[in-house]
Amino acid sequence: MLQDLMPQAERIAAKLKARNETIGIAESSTAGLLSAALLAVPGASAYFMGGAVVYTRISRAELLRVTEADLGGITPSTEVYAMLFARKIKERLGTTWTLGETGTAGPTGSRYGHNAGHSCVAVIGPGGEKSITIETGKSDRMDNMRAFSIAALDLLEQVIG
C-alpha cells in the first residue's frame, strides 16, 4: 500500500525541500499512512516536523489539544473537522503546511451518520486553506485507507503547487 503513495510523496518532498518548507500531519482514518509515505522519502527530516494519528477523543484532546469549546457545533468526519485538525497541528508544530484528515474507513459507517468510505481532508499553507470530501462508496477498510491517502496527497500536491 505504501508503494502506491510513493510517487506523490516523492514529488511533495522535493517541492518542500527545494523551498525550505515544513509539514505536519494530523490524520485519523488513514492510520498514519500519510506520515509514513512522507517519511519514507530519504531526507524527510528536512521537511517533516511530525504527525499524529488522532483516532480517539483522548488522542484528540492530548495530541492536538482540542477542547470541547473548539468542537462547538462541529461534527466529526466533516471538512470543518478536518480543518480543525490541520489548524491544531499547525499550532502544535508551527509548520509551513499542515494536513488534517478524518473519516470512516469501514467496514461499517460512523455514529455520526457517515457511510464507510467517507473521508475529509484539509490543507493549510501560505496560499490559504482548502478542503475536500472523498466518498468511495466501498466498505473495504484497506481499499478506503489507500483511496483516502491518495486523495489527501493529491490535494496536498495541488495546494503546494
Image (cartoon, helix red, strand yellow):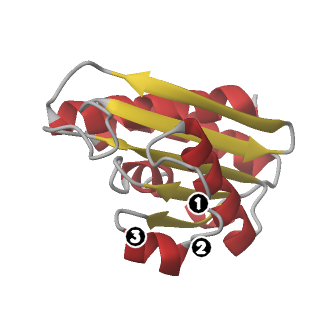
At a point 81% along the width and 55% down the height, the residue shown is 20
**Which of the two marks, 1 or 3, is nearer to us in this view?**
1
Q: Amino acid at mark 3?
A: Arg
Mark 3 Cα-neighbour bin, 10 Å: few <14, some 14–19, many ≥20: few
Let me know if residue 143 appears in the view.
Answer: yes
Point out residue 30 in the picture as x, y percentages from the top left corner.
36, 47
CA gap, disc 1 and disc 3:
11 Å
Most extreme residue toward the top is: 137
Mark 2 Cα-neighbour bin, 10 Å: few <14, some 14–19, many ≥20: few
Point out residue 75 in the picture as x, y percentages from the top left corner.
49, 47
Q: Secondary structure at mark 2?
A: loop
Mark 1 Cα-neighbour bin, 10 Å: few <14, some 14–19, many ≥20: few
Let me know if residue 42 appears in the view.
Answer: no
Circle 1 residue: 71
Point out residue 80 in the picture as x, y percentages from the top left corner.
61, 42
Q: Amino acid at mark 1?
A: Leu
Q: Secondary structure at mark 3?
A: helix
Circle 2 residue: 67
State which tag comes first along the sequence, 1 or 3.
3
Quadrant in the picture for residue 69: bottom right
The answer to which of 61 and 2 lies nearer the viewer is: 61
Q: Which mark is residue 57?
A: 3
Decide: marks 1, 3 in contact (CB < 8 A)?
no
The answer to which of 68 and 31 lies nearer the viewer is: 68
